[in-house]
Amino acid sequence: MAFFRPVLQKAGFTEQQWRVLRVLNDHKELEAKQLADLCCILSPSLTRIITRFEEDGLLKRKKSLTDQRISLLSLTPKANKIVKEFRPEVDASYQRIIEKLGEERMKELSRLLNDIIALESSHD
């Protein structure tokens, strides 16, 4: 995380908060459970982030047209602007990691992390 902290601190976000912004930016609209799974964040932590982001005008919530029990989450234009502003710096941090580890080791790390995520999902 040392590669990312300076950028995220400048943006005013924790690693988990940035993950939520990035994932919602990439997927446009998600249910809270989908978002938690994609971000690898536990529901209580995600609930705190969602609450803060709603208060800060970064996230909006709407009911699903197909199931009124489900809320769909998406970023506001304000949040999209923040992601657009800081993503190049975050991506540059990823690039520095790839340069230090090498492409093949980075792919191996990604495979191993995906295996861990799969283990956790099958444990539920």
Image (cartoon, grey):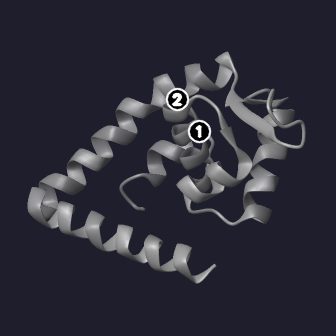
Report the residue at 56% width, 62% height from top: 40
Q: Which residue is mark 1?
A: 21
Q: Is residue 78 left or right of residue 122?
A: right
Q: Nearer the viewer, residue 38 or 45?
A: 38
Q: Position of residue 99 (x, y in %)?
A: 13, 53
Q: Which of the 4 image quarters holds residue 79?
A: top right
Q: Position of residue 68 (x, y in %)?
A: 89, 36
Q: Position of residue 103 (x, y in %)?
A: 11, 56
Q: Earlier in the sequence, mark 1 or mark 2?
A: 1
Q: Is residue 114 left or right of residue 68?
A: left
Report the residue at 58% width, 83% height from top: 123
Q: Is residue 85 left or right of residue 80?
A: left
Q: As shown in the figure, which amino acid type bears the numbered disc 2?
A: Val
Q: Is residue 6 left or right of residue 36?
A: left
Q: Which residue is mark 2?
A: 83
Pointer 1 with pointer 2, Cβ within 8 A: yes
Q: Residue 86 — which label?
A: none
Q: In the rendered image of this protein, does residue 47 appear above or below residue 29?
A: below
Q: Residues within 10 Å of mark 1 (few under 14, many from 20)?
A: many
Q: As shown in the figure, which amino acid type bears the numbered disc 1?
A: Leu
Q: Which of the 4 image quarters holds residue 76?
A: top right
Report the residue at 52% width, 45% height from top: 8
Q: Nearer the viewer, residue 41 or 81?
A: 41
Q: Position of residue 5 (x, y in %)?
A: 47, 53
Q: In the rendered image of this protein, does residue 98 appear above or below residue 13?
A: below
From the image, which quarter does the N terminus lie in? bottom left
> In terms of secondary structure, where does tag 2 sit?
helix
> In terms of secondary structure, where does tag 1 sit?
helix
Q: Which of the 4 image quarters holds residue 110?
A: bottom left
